[in-house]
Image (tube, rainbow, N blue to C red):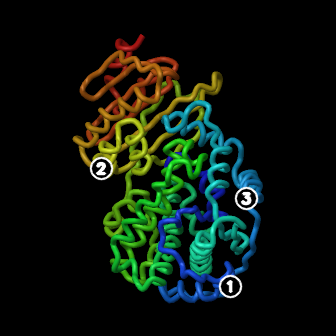
């Protein structure tokens, strides 16, 4: 995981939803043709811009807005199991990204139902327009979805995503490739109608990077959703487009093929294209181990990427701290362990940073995360590289070791924390401190 994204990927990817982020794009010509009348002309222009030739006609249909929510609810039932949804929801709550009463499936469906303007179903190879919204929104959405259809003809989008299915941070990076390229091509198509090009108009590219600044009140469900869902929903479109622009600047038309043939492996590579160009990959740090591991079963696990850490720090330590430290991330992983008897959920989490100083800063900031996400945050022992105590769901142990930071949270007893890759001395440090 890049933290829980499976539900988002499951219902967005088979029907790659086009969010209504087009209000800030240049308007199409004043006398735009009816929605589908311009389809062939749009495909021709997208082909010219990208160098990707259409390989066949695109099937399409118009559906009423009222059918969108039932469609998404049915999609959830088809592609993701209830226990998978529970695992994602539990992880969100355990990290502090969502409150205890949060309903992940309902909120995600409500969010997408509110936002969607069109979608391309790459399983059915068919484009669907929503019979709602202004002519400008429908025209822009059509361009965006035709860009998906064109990419699907060349790169088989379902297989493209499936290749990273075991790593949701990698899957989200691939989704950013898909949505970023479609957003860039849509924007370039519309910009060229005004006699300009994104390649020569950095102001327009910058404008698109702020597409997530949706005016308060315009989308009530979006406004109420946790920061994590809002950011991960918008990331593929906004940061994905900036990533695509960076690759276009470097490679020209070859960029539209290169990002699919050699996709980014992390959200960090999307956020920092130079890391993509230099093929700088993440590491997987060793998790802290719980002592009585035989009484627990692995419930879920996955990657915690730079985007996840950026949102976490922004939520509990502030935007300035997040922007300064998150780029120093070099790897993250977590595992939720469920008690076989009492169903207690323990979080084992580790992150690796660019060096000891960055890890030291994160070690300090993560204490703010713990204090912020819990009503109870009792510290029994605090040292330069170790903090132990009790939180809402049990005992915790936070440690820094060189460039890595680890945390065990939700333990029934301090004795549960005696096993670790670092080994000796941990029991003596923890046991006297927590009672």
Which image quarter holds the C terminus?
A: top left
Instruction: Give the quarter of the image for residue 384.
Output: top left
Instruction: Give the quarter of the image for residue 10.
Output: bottom right
Numbered disc 1: secondary structure: helix
What is the x, y in percent for residue 134? 63, 68
Q: Residues within 10 Å of mark 1 (few under 14, many from 20)?
A: few
Reply above or below: 59 against 363.
below
The label nearer to you, 1 versus 3, is 1
Numbered disc 3: secondary structure: helix
Q: Residue at x 59, y 46 (%)?
A: 220
**Real-space Cα separation, disc 2 to disc 3, in angstroms:** 40 Å
**Real-space Cα separation, disc 1 to disc 2, in angstroms:** 49 Å
Give left or right: position of 55 versus 235.
right
Residue picked out by circle 1: 37
Give left or right: position of 173 versus 12.
left
What is the x, y in percent for residue 263? 46, 69
Q: Residues within 10 Å of mark 2 (few under 14, many from 20)?
A: some
Q: First in sequence: mark 1 or mark 2?
A: 1
Viewer-side residue, 149 vs 139: 139
Q: First in sequence: mark 1 or mark 3?
A: 1
What is the x, y in percent for residue 212? 47, 56
Residue picked out by circle 2: 328
Residue picked out by circle 3: 68
The label nearer to you, 2 versus 3, is 3
Residue 58 seen in the figure: yes
Q: Residue at x 53, y 69 (%)?
A: 178
What is the x, y in percent for residue 367? 35, 29
């Amino acid at each position: 995981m890049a933290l829980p994204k499976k539900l988002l990927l499951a219902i967005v990817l088979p029907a790659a939803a086009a969010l209504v982020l087009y209000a800030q794009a240049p308007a199409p010509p004043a006398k735009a043709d009816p929605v589908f009348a311009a389809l062939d002309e749009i495909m021709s222009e997208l082909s010219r811009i990208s160098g990707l030739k259409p390989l066949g006609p695109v099937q399409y249909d118009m559906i009423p807005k009222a059918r969108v929510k039932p469609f998404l609810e049915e999609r959830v039932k088809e592609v993701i199991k209830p226990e998978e949804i529970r695992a994602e929801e539990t992880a969100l709550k355990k990290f502090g990204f969502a409150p205890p009463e949060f309903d992940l499936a309902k909120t995600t469906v409500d969010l997408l139902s509110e936002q969607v303007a069109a979608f391309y179903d790459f399983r059915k190879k068919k484009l669907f327009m929503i019979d709602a919204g202004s002519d400008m929104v429908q025209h822009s959405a059509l361009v965006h979805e035709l860009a998906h259809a064109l990419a699907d003809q060349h790169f088989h989008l379902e297989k493209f995503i499936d290749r990273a299915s075991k790593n949701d941070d990698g899957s989200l990076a691939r989704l950013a490739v898909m949505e970023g390229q479609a957003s860039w091509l849509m924007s370039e198509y519309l910009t060229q109608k005004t006699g300009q090009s994104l390649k020569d108009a950095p102001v327009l590219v910058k404008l698109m990077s702020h597409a997530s600044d949706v005016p308060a009140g315009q989308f009530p469900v979006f406004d109420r959703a946790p920061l994590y869902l809002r950011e991960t929903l918008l990331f593929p479109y906004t940061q994905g487009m900036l990533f695509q622009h960076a690759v276009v600047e470097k490679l020209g038309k070859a960029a539209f093929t290169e990002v699919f043939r050699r996709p980014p492996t992390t959200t960090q590579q999307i956020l920092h294209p130079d890391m993509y160009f230099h093929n700088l990959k993440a590491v997987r740090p060793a998790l802290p181990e719980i002592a009585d591991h035989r009484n627990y079963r692995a419930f879920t696990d996955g990657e915690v990427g730079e985007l996840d850490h950026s949102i976490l720090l922004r939520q509990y330590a502030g935007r300035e701290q997040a922007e300064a430290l998150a780029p120093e991330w070099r790897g993250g992983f977590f595992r939720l362990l469920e008690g076989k008897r009492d169903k207690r959920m323990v979080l084992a989490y580790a992150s690796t940073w660019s060096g000891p100083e960055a890890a030291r800063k994160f070690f300090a900031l993560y204490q703010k995360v713990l204090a912020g996400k819990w009503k109870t945050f009792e510290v029994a022992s605090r040292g330069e590289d170790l903090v132990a105590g009790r939180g809402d769901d049990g005992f915790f142990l936070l440690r820094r070791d060189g460039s890595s930071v680890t945390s065990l949270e939700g333990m029934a007893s301090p004795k549960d924390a005696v096993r670790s890759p670092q080994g000796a001395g941990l029991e003596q440090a923890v046991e006297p401190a927590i009672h």
